[in-house]
Amino acid sequence: MMTNLSYREKSLYASLAAELIVYGPYFFLHQQNSVNKVAGMIIGIIVLQIILQSVIAAFTRNRVTDERDRLIELRGYRAGYLTIASLMVLGLGMLWFHAAVGHLRLDNRMVGLHFLSVFFGMLVIADITKTAAQIVAYRRAL
Amino acid sequence: MPAIRNQIRELRALREMTQQELADRVGVTRQTVIAIEQDKYSPSLETAFKVASVLGVPIEQCFQYDPRGKR
């Protein structure tokens, strides 16, 4: 099956796998927010992406990207932008609501770490959406 | 039914050309050629002209527009 995928498609599958491997444990298993954990995650995703993309590039002879690849990439960015915009509106709405009814009772350090996780989570969801949207577009008719 | 249909597969077979060969000469990926032949992707005007030129036929012989078809 891999021989029927273009270089760009293989790259996307590798990106999605890296994102799920690195971000999944953090958001589903972690117990406490931490700046060090977020920094570790960022370094981890960068290293894993470099490794996976290098392997794919080394084993792919034809690395041409054409108009269809660029069109699908634009669709991915559109999906990612809509996702992060929606999450931001939702997040701001919830923040306003909790502040208005007095539920927001976090000390200063917790507020910072909480928002770090929330905003980073939004970015991660949008990035995964962007990648997944491109993978779907490659499988379907444009 | 797609709005734009093509006979690229038949024309390519007549010239004993592989999908990769056509892709290389047009400047697209083999997967794009596959998508075009399967009516999953309508190429740009420039690419359509290149395909017709490589296959040695007028563009109307390669691609047909059906106003009743939908995208």
Image: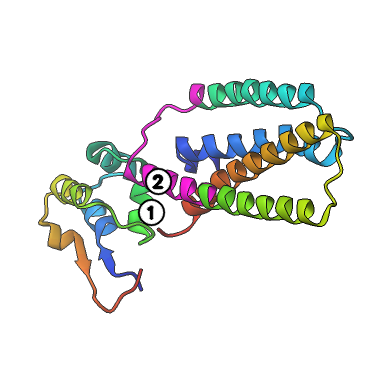
Residue A119 or residue B44, whichever sits in front? A119
Q: Is residue A36 left or right of residue A43?
A: right
* Residue reaching furthest to the right: A31
Circle 2 chain: B
Q: Position of residue B16 (x, y in %)?
A: 25, 47
Magenta residues (range): A57-80
> What residue do we see at 59% from left, 41% from top?
A127
Q: Is residue A33 visible?
A: no
> What residue do we see at 67% from left, 21% from top?
A43
Q: Is residue B59 left or right of residue B9?
A: left
Q: Relative to A49, say whether B20 is above or below.
A: below
Residue A111 or residue A58, whichever sits in front? A111
Residue A3 or residue A107, whichever sits in front? A107
- Most prominent secondary structure in the magenta stretch? helix
> What residue do we see at 58% from left, 47% from top?
A84
Q: Position of residue A56 (x, y in %)?
A: 53, 27
Q: Callout 1, which amino acid? A: Ala
Q: Which residue is mark 2?
A: B31
Residue B24 or residue A16, whichever sits in front? A16
- Magenta span has A91? no
Q: Relative to B56, say whether B2 is above or below.
A: below
Q: Relative to B39, say whether A42 is above or below.
A: above
